[in-house]
Image (cartoon, helix red, strand yellow):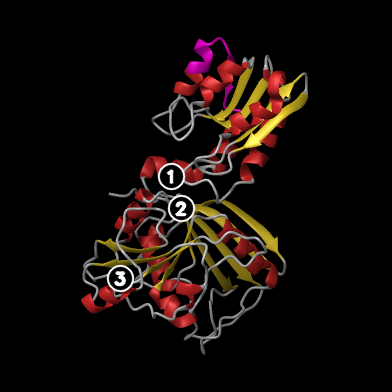
Amino acid sequence: MIRNDRHFMEQALRLARRAMGHTRPNPLVGCVIVREGQVVGKGYHLRAGEPHAEVLALRQAGASAQGATLYVTLEPCSHHGRTPPCADALVQAGVGRVVVAMIDPNPQVSGRGLQRLQKAGIEVTAGVCQEEAAALNQPFITWITLGRPLVTLKMAASLDGKTATHTGESQWITGPLARHHVQRMRAQHDLILVGIGTVLADNPRLNCRLPGGRDPIRLVVDSRLRTPPQAAILTASERAGIWIATTRHAPAERRIAFEKMGFHDEESGTAQRQLLLCRSTASGRVDLVDLLQQLGKRHILSLLAESGATLNAALLDAGLVDRLALFLAPRLIGGQGAAGLLHGDGVACLADAHRLTHLQITQVGEDFLLEGSLVNRCLPA
């Protein structure tokens, strides 16, 4: 690896991050073109259907791309999708060397792009900042390999694990900077998931309240279709979809009522109002594995769960949580009747407890954010 390879690849990674939350079902990709130590072109993929990062960088570089080194965070595509193959564009531009952070996990590409470049006599280096690139595109990798979105479970509690007082007061356990951070998280995810219990108890909007922020799709897990027609989540955003996940055992009159409000069962990732009919569990609840597979078919790559203790536990027990984002407020609430983070039966022995790895703790204002990855998660059936 040439000494400056990592330096320029880090620039490409920073460019890729700018489009977080906007590119589904495509990955985040950034590109930098360097000639004689100077950046002559750069670009990042903005959204599906628009030019890829390499093409934008080549346009900016112009004739300076000939013989230059191109740094890209993901292997250039070699197939015709909505846009022509980037590998062909690099060959035509006459770049001298291509440095790639990671191989594309998409079976349509997966090494073929690099082979195309090498056959054209272009020097190829792969694996520069590979771990960073994989972390950035973990939602895309999960979607390609497992057929479902990457799931981040967001929770907030006091230091003693309480999410409300014994009287039910919960606003606000965390401070304004932590809540601002959550708004940023919403803008970076494709979809926000919440359970019907939270809708009935808190009447949340779940939109992004940052200036110019992007509203994600909001999805309510509601096996009996109890979501009130006047619920704030149904009207909080005109820009993003509102989806309801239910089962075929939901009362017929409720299903008809939702269809009159414009909710229909469609295998589309673009319809604003959708009714996702899922398999039901033995207890009559929405089968979460089936739900996530349906979301994958609708090109949902990243999911932020802002659910209550019951749905939190169900997601964990189903092995569907990939990441945890736990905000801890420096206060103690106490009380046997005060709500906690997780309900359900829990594990019978400590050896079966859900474990985290790659832990990171960050102070956010007066609060602390603990982030980590769940280990030994189950693969979908």
Return the disc, 1 or 2, that comes first in the chain's sequence: 1
At label 2, counting other C-alpha atoms closer than 10 Å, the crowd grade (few under 14, some 14-19, many 20 or more) is: many
Which element carries disc 3, helix, strand or loop? helix
Return the disc, 3 or 2, that comes first in the chain's sequence: 3
- Tell me if residue 122 is in the magenta stretch: yes
Contact between labelled residues 2 and 3, with CB atoms less than 8 Å apart: no
Asked if residue 6 can be seen in this view, the reply is no
- Mark 3 or mark 1: which is in front? 3
Q: Which mark is residue 247?
A: none
What distance separates the C-alpha of mark 3 from that of mark 1? 32 Å
At label 3, counting other C-alpha atoms closer than 10 Å, the crowd grade (few under 14, some 14-19, many 20 or more) is: some
* Residue identifier under label 2: 322
Amino acid found under the numbered disc labelled 3: Glu
Magenta segment, which residues? 116-128
What distance separates the C-alpha of mark 3 from that of mark 2? 33 Å
* Residue identifier under label 1: 142
Amino acid found under the numbered disc labelled 1: Thr
The residue under the point 29% across, 61% down is 265
Which element carries disc 2, helix, strand or loop? loop
- Tell me if residue 176 is in the magenta stretch: no
Image quadrant where one finds the N terminus: top right
Please, is residue 65 above or below residue 331 in the view?
above
Please, is residue 161 above or below residue 3 in the view?
below
The image quadrant of residue 249 is bottom left
Towards the viewer: 277 or 263: 263
* Residue identifier under label 3: 259
What distance separates the C-alpha of mark 1 from that of mark 2? 9 Å
